Amino acid sequence: MKKTSILIYSLLFAASTFAYSPRNIDEKLVHTFQTSFPHAEKVSWEEMPNQYVVSFVDNGILSRVTYQKKGSDITSYVRYYLEENLPFSIRSEVKRHYPNKKVQGVVEVSAPLPADDEDAAAVLTTVYYIRLEGAGTLINIRMSSDGNSEVVEKFKKAN
């Protein structure tokens, strides 16, 4: 009896770790996602009125991609991670501009720029929202992929 219960719970757990895919998602979209993110784990699909939101873990990084329902184009791609996953050029710029600050977390947002030509494919642009901690301050900055940055918020730490 105990072995049977353990087996049933194990099977239920294993089944719950597979991706949920709403029944009315186009198979091509699911295939596009699986091809784009072959190492995705803990995949969860959510259907919204005009889009699908897929939350998942990709190579240890919590991620979320949003697809338009019509056309299946990506409308945004968001990743949440720590300093070690920042691209080298961005990390170098952060260290250069904020030498005495420690990176507490990063939200990377990629979204398509509008194309000048209707027939041209949209190009994704990436912006990094980086939380920095100093001796008495917390700073949130926005940095573009070309290294330009601006302070979005600045807080004094409570004593």
Image: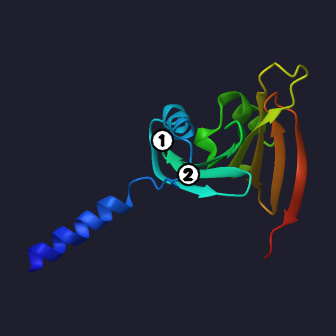
Q: Residues within 10 Å of mark 2 (few under 14, many from 20)?
A: few
Q: Using residue 52 as the reference point, say whether residue 147 is left or right of it.
A: right
Amino acid bearing label 1: Asn
Residue 100 point in image, percent of width and height:
76, 47
Q: Residues within 10 Å of mark 1 (few under 14, many from 20)?
A: few
Q: Foreground: 25 or 36?
A: 25
75 w.r.t. 8: above or below: above
Give left or right: position of 89 versus 41.
Answer: right
Q: Earlier in the sequence, mark 1 or mark 2?
A: 2
Residue 5, relative to residue 10: is it above or below?
below
Q: Quadrant of the N terminus?
A: bottom left
Give coordinates of residue 125: x percent, y percent.
78, 32
Kind of element beneath mark 2: loop
Residue appearing at x 51%, y 36% in the figure? 37
> Picture quarter containing residue 135?
bottom right
Q: Which mark is residue 108?
A: none
Q: Would you identify the image quadrant in which residue 77 lies?
A: top right
Q: Which residue: 82% across, 19% down?
A: 119
The residue singled out by tag 1 in the image is 59
Q: Quadrant of residue 108?
A: top right
Q: Position of residue 90 (x, y in %)?
A: 73, 33
Q: Which mark is residue 24?
A: 2
**Between marks 1 and 2 in the image, the one whose residue lies nearer the viewer:** 2
Using the image as rendered, state which of residue 23 and residue 88 is in the foreground.
23
Amino acid carrying label 2: it is: Asn
Q: What is the x, y in percent for residue 66?
A: 68, 46
Is residue 88 found left or right of 44 in the rendered image?
right
